[in-house]
Amino acid sequence: MAEAGITLVYGGGRVGLMGLCADGVLGAGGQVIGVIPRILHEVEVAHQSLTELHVTETMHERKKLMFDRSDAFVVLPGGIGTLDETFEIMTWRQLRLHDKPIVVVDDGGYWKPFGDMIDHIIGTGFASERTRHLYQVVDNVEAVLPLLSHAPAPSVPADPDRL
């Protein structure tokens, strides 16, 4: 990311895969913007060496600011918070509130159950086939930047009052 001149925007923590990702981008001379809710900042989970660190009052403000500052979304293996953010950004795309790329990194098959669940939701009639086109899947992080370099520029202007 640093070599490509891409700024990382993420949840602002110093732990987990995203903390390691932030360290890697910073270590390579890149820019990293963290957005963390006050409750997590107060328990000292925040990464203190970022290019920018924004502290929000609520999780909703955090997600909105991360959305506003991002041109694409990359989903790494993670937990319930990752699922929450993934489904919300997919829902916003389904509602045509944005058309920014969403890339799921299925490293080692981690997100296969996610894909199976999407298939199940479509198969039972609770979503249309178009749901599969809300996101793309790659097998590893090395495939993310080449995929995004060929993605069309977003054409849906983000309207902050609609989110």
Image (cartoon, rainbow, N blue to C red):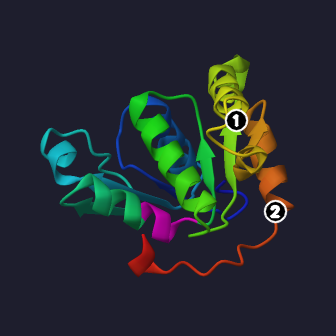
Q: Nearer the viewer, residue 35 or 49?
A: 35
Q: Which residue is drawn at 47% across and 71% down?
A: 68
Task: Give how far across and how far down residue 17 sits, in percent.
Answer: 50, 32
**Residues at badges 1 and 2 in contact (C-beta under 8 Å)?**
no
- 47 on left or right of 154: left
* Distance (Cα) linking label 1 and label 2: 25 Å
Q: How crowded is mark 2: few (under 14 residues within 10 Å), some or many (20 or more)?
A: few
Residues shaded magenta: 66-70
Was residue 35 drawn as part of the magenta stretch in this picture?
A: no
Query: What secondary structure prevails in the magenta region?
Result: helix
Q: Hey, what amino acid is under mark 1?
A: Ile
Q: Which of 64 and 161 is in front in this view?
A: 161
Task: Give how far across and how far down residue 102 sits, in percent.
Answer: 66, 51
Whether 107 is drawn above or below 44: the answer is above
Instruction: Give the secondary structure at mark 1.
Output: helix
Task: Give how far across and how far down residue 58 sits, in percent.
Answer: 22, 56
Was residue 69 drawn as part of the magenta stretch in this picture?
A: yes
Task: Give how far across and how far down residue 61 sits, in percent.
Answer: 29, 63
Quadrant of the snapshot with the C terminus: bottom left
From where the camera sits, is residue 84 visible?
A: yes
Q: Nearer the viewer, mark 1 or mark 2?
A: 1
Badge number at residue 151: 2
Q: Hey, what amino acid is under mark 2?
A: Ala
Q: Name the residue under label 1.
A: 122
Q: Residues within 10 Å of mark 1 (few under 14, many from 20)?
A: some
Q: Nearer the viewer, residue 128 or 2?
A: 128
